[in-house]
Amino acid sequence: MSTIRPSYMKARFVSAGVLHITLAIVSLAMVLPFTWMVLTSLKSINEVGESNWLPAVPQWGNYKEVFQTSTVQADGAYLGRWYCNSLFVAAWTTFLQVLSSAMAAYSFARLRWPGRDKVFFLYLSTLMLPGLVMMIPSYQIMIELSWIDSFVGLVVPSAFGAFGVFLLRQFMLTIPASLDEAAEIDGAGKWRIFWDIILPLSRPGLITLTIFTFMGSYHSFFWPLVMLKSAHKYTLPIGLLYFDSSRGQETHLLMAAVTLSVAPLILLFVILQKYLVKGIQLGAVKG
Amino acid sequence: MAFTLIPMLFSMALAFSNWDIKLHNQFKAKPIEFVGFENFVRLFSQPDFARFLGNTLFFMVGIPIGIALSLSSAVLLSQDLYSGGSRKTFGALIAGAMLITCCLMLTLVGLGSSAMTLLIGGLFCLMLLGGVVGGKTVYRTLFYLPSFTSGVAVFILWKRMYDSQNGPINTALTPLLDGLTGVVLAFPARLFSAAMWICLGLMMLVLLLGLIRMRLSWRDGEAGSLSVLLSAAVLLVPFFIAAQWSFTSDQSPLLLFGAVALCVWQLTVARRNGADFPSTAFNGLGSAMLTSTLLVSAQMMILGIAPVFGQLPRMASDGLVPPNWLSDYHWAKPALMIMSLWGAVGSQSMLLYIAALGNVPKELHEAADIEGATRFQRFWHVTWPQLAPTTFFIVVMGVIGGLQGGFEMARTMTGGGPAGATTTLSYFIFVEGFETGRLGYSSAVAWTLFAMVVVVTIFNLRVGSRYVND
């Protein structure tokens, strides 16, 4: 390093500065809409139309109002309720999907049974079927089962997914088979191996899948939009849409609602960032 | 075992139930009737499908631009930030001092007119401070924020921002456009038509570049005759669009003539240089297509800018006003596109590219440095080919997603809106299936879309696997 000429060092310093400034400008562009969102959510209704972004006095009450009060006369149509609905649905979906995927993946990766790889291929090919094609027949099935406007109808169809199976299978294939064999010699059954050896070892994969499924369920829009009819059962996205159409004039309240629905995501991302970035990169490379 | 079979059977049952619907087109409140191909005939004979397919394709033009954006941000984020030790402290000191100044002034000035500038300046310093202290992770988080949060909430946020009266975008644009009006009126109108012609000339230049590139790869045996011809045809598409477009149709004879002349010229050069081409007809189709698609995106952008120059003086004399964005037929699509590009800067593609950039062997870069390659050459000849599998993956997924996309935006922001300007195929399927209730017709559209997705994906995979393995 000592042989580097000072002018070169200087050039590097300048280029690092330019890089930082460029990155900061792009980051600013990414953050500005969110800034506007938060600042608007703190305004009072008289300030909403003003071009100044800053509220004179922050109205923290907006959040309280959005979270608690009934937005219209309909029973239970408020953000807190939608929050709980979303969390409930997402938690169940995630739990069931991770469980079913782990079991299916274990079967595809470890157990030997006739036609296994063919069935796996078939399973995988359901990934190609676009949701749009499935939507109408699925809806018909839901009518038959009378699951329309119920959480069961939201959770059950999304409790099984080929993507999760695929991701976890790829992950389990990397676990050395000698571990299973050792356990088998010690007298462990298939279930024992699954619970005590495979599951703990595929923890990173499970975490990734959990985050993905949770996010997917939290964001899911099409299916809940079709399925849910009564306002107190709405999940957050549908609730926001409803809020937008019923009280869209009150931009400050709408923005408070939007902030509240985005905030947990940002928090989640900042906390779980390491797993997420890894998971996205892993999922794509394997896929 | 039983636990694996049940979900499988369930999903298979779902998959097979499609067939029923497809075979028995089912109308609401009527017994199931078999109407054969009637739905498909209707689909192709009515203009709706073609129009909404056109909208979908328009949004898909954003895919290559989005890839370019996410690649650039990945490259930026992969640079060495040289932030260590004393430099870090130094940078942090500067940014921190600026931040404190902004905050102080903000409190002193209060909520006056300059508060906005200070606010944005302060935010900028905050970003810089975060970046200097936290390094790449902070920038990456900030870049990835839009696509991580993307969903109904963010669409509603943008819908408010695009609001024509109170939205922050138009509030910010109004003074800018007023200033621009003054500037435009100060210059002679000739200048602007000249600028328009320069743009059209640039379009020609891009075409020429593409053709030369095709010719060279043909000569070097990298691309077969048919793939070259196909890509050249793709390159000509913007010219035909320009000929159809009302803003540029005056200039179209000259444009078309020029384009044809360029093609003929390059063809004669190719003929003269030697007629024996070693490759088979479809060789190298992938890379040729990729190049031409990238160039076409550039051409389309230039084509979009050109008439703006042509029309500016006339528009300025009436006074420039910001558009109504989502409620304006011509602006709704670009508005949605801008929003998606905002998300595309730091999308999943960026994360994939960052990972791929990290995997490029250092030796290759060193070798290129020893050979005396410039930074751009090093990127284009060393890094970019190494990124091919990633790019391929992103393109395939992007095309699949793009063909089926646009539903959430249309539903939350525009309602398919103004006069169907933002209705994509997926939204069309939704409206037909769940609002109009024509389930049969809707599933006919869905299956057509699915067939298109399959065909395009197979094409991508066949072409791409060659390209990646090259």
Image (cartoon, coloured by chain):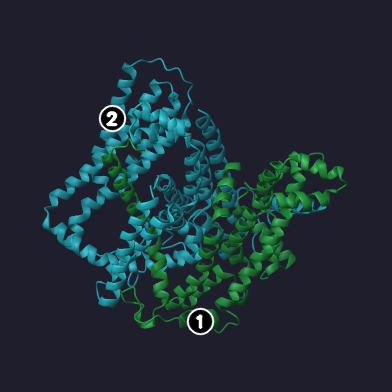
Chain colours: A green, B cyan
For disc 1, the chain is A
Residue furthest to the right:
A187
- The residue tagged 1 is A64
Q: Is residue A106 left or right of residue B355?
A: right
Observer-nearest of A101 and B249: A101
x, y (%) of residue B240?
Answer: 34, 41
Identify the residue at horizontal 16%, vertical 57% (top origin): B184
Would you call the spot at circle 2 few (<14 residues within 10 Å), some (14-19), or many (20 or more)? some
Amino acid type, mark 2: Leu
x, y (%) of residue A281?
Answer: 55, 47
Whether residue A89 can be seen here: yes
User: In terms of image quadrants, where is residue A274?
Assistant: bottom right
x, y (%) of residue B452?
Answer: 55, 44
For disc 2, the chain is B
Disc 2 element: helix
Q: Where A91 falls versus B278 (above or below)?
A: below
**Comparing labels 2 and 1, the label whose residue is closer to the camera:** 1
Q: Where B24 falls versus B182 (above or below)?
A: above
Are callouts 2 and 1 both on one chain? Answer: no
x, y (%) of residue B398?
Answer: 50, 47
- The residue tagged 2 is B262
- Spatial separation of the CA atoms under disc 2 and disc 1: 66 Å
Q: How many marks?
A: 2
Amino acid type, mark 1: Lys
User: In terms of image quadrants, where is residue B178?
Assistant: bottom left
